Amino acid sequence: MKLAIISHTEHYKAADGTIVGWGPTITEINHLLEIFDTIYHVAMLHETDAPPSALPYVSHRIVFVPLPALGGNSLGAKCQLLWKAPKVLSIVNKTLKKVDWFQFRAPTGIGVYVIPFLTLCVKTPGWFKYAGNWNQETPPLGYRWQRWMLKQQSRKVTINGSWNHQPKHCITFENPCLTNDELDEGLKLGKEKSLEGLINVCYVGRLERPKGVERIIQAMAALTEVEKKRIGVVHLVGDGPEKAYFVELSKTAGVTFKFHGFLPREEVFEIYKKSQVFLMPTTASEGFPKAIAEAMNFGCIPIVSDVSSISQYIKNNIHGLILDEVTSNRLIERIRTVLNYTEEEHIRTIHSQKEIVRLFTFEYYNWSITSRILSLKNK
C-alpha cells in the first residue's frame, strides 16, 4: 500500500543535502513504514537552517514532496497562502494519483482549501488527523472552519480526547511518541527514581507565556528558601521569541535554571531520565502534548493544566497533579504537594502511569490505524 501524507510539517535541507523535518512528525512517519510500502509526504520546505530537533527519514521508501513554505498571521502571509492555493492543490492532486490512501494533518493554513478539495474532488480513501484542541471554544477562524468541514464529511477524523456530541466518524486517537524499547527502559527507570535528595524539574515545549514558562519561573521564585534547596535544576527545553525575557527573569529566582534550546529527541529523553517532575502549566490550545506521555514514561510526575483532553488521561492525585486554576500560586501548591510526597505516594503514582503510557506507543498507534481506519475503506 502507498500513503500520501499532506501536512504543514517544517522541512529543511541540511548542509549535506539531506532533507530533515520536525522530529516528532518524522519519527511517527518512519514507524508507519511497518504498515505502508511507500509514503509520500507533501509538506513545506523552508530555506532557513534546520533546528537540532529536526530528523531525517530512515528509508528511501519515504518520498518528500515539497510545498512552498506558507503560513503566518500577517496580512501578507495570508494573501500568499491564498495566492499559492492553485500550486498547492496541483502538487497534492499529482501525488494522490500515486497512492492508495491519504492522511491530511489539520489544523493548518492550507487546510482552508485542501480539506474542501479532498472532500469534494478526491475519491482516494483517506482520513484526517486533527492534532489541535478539538473542543476549543473560541478557535481562530481558520481552525473553526476546518473543524466544521471535518464534522460535515464522512471520512474518519482522528482527534485528541473523547467529547460529548462527538460525530461517529470522529474517533479518539492517541498521538504516538514511544517505541517498545523505550517503554521497557521507562519501566525499569521508574522503579529506580526517588524523591530523596535534590529534585530535578523539566519543561519541554515552546518558550512562551501561554505555555506557562513565566508561571514556572515565578512559582520557583516564590518557594521558601528551604524548599528551593530541594530543587536541583529546572530544565527548560525549547525556544521562542520570549526566551531572553525568561532567561533574565530566572536569574533572580534563587533556583538553577538551564535553558537548552531545541534538542534532538535522544537528548530530550535524557532530560526526562534525570528529572523527577514535569511541568506544563499551559493556557495555550493543546491537543494532548506528547511531552507529557514521554515524561511519564521515564518516571516524571506531571503537574499539568486541565486543558483539552489532558485531564482525560492524567487523573488528579493518581497519574500526577492537575491545575484546576492555571496560576503561579496554584502551581506552587502542586509543587509543594510533590515535595511532601511519601515514598508510598511516589511509587503508587509512577506505577499508575504505565497503563496510560502504553497508549502512546508507535505499536499501538499502528494497530489502531490498521484496525480502525484501513479495515474500513471510508470514502
Image (spheres, rainbow, N blue to C red):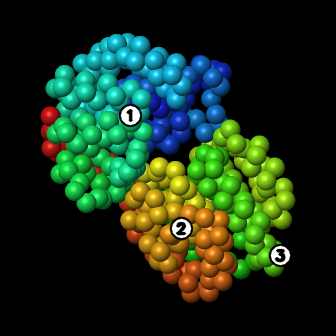
Q: Could you tell which of marks 1 and 3 lies nearer the N-terminus? A: 1
Q: Residues within 10 Å of mark 2 (few under 14, many from 20)?
A: few
Residue 170 appears left or right of 66:
left
Expressed as whole percent of the image width and height from the top left, the position of residue 354 reads: 45, 69
Q: Could you tell which of marks 2 and 1 lies nearer the N-terminus? A: 1
In this picture, is 149 found above or below 335? above
Which residue is disc 2 drawn over?
325
Expressed as whole percent of the image width and height from the top left, the position of residue 40 reads: 36, 26
Which residue is found at the position 49% from the left and 26% from the top? 71
Mark number, residue 225: 3
Residue 318 appears left or right of 231:
left
- Identify the secondary structure beneath mark 1: helix
Expressed as whole percent of the image width and height from the top left, the position of residue 157 reads: 26, 44
Which residue is disc 1 drawn over?
142
Q: Residues within 10 Å of mark 3 (few under 14, many from 20)?
A: few
Expressed as whole percent of the image width and height from the top left, the position of residue 105 reads: 37, 36
Which residue is found at the position 39% from the left and 26% from the top? 110
Q: CA distance from mark 1 to mark 3?
A: 47 Å
Q: For the residues carrying marks 1 and 3, which lies nearer the camera in this image?
A: 1
Q: What type is the residue that disc 1 sits on? A: Gly
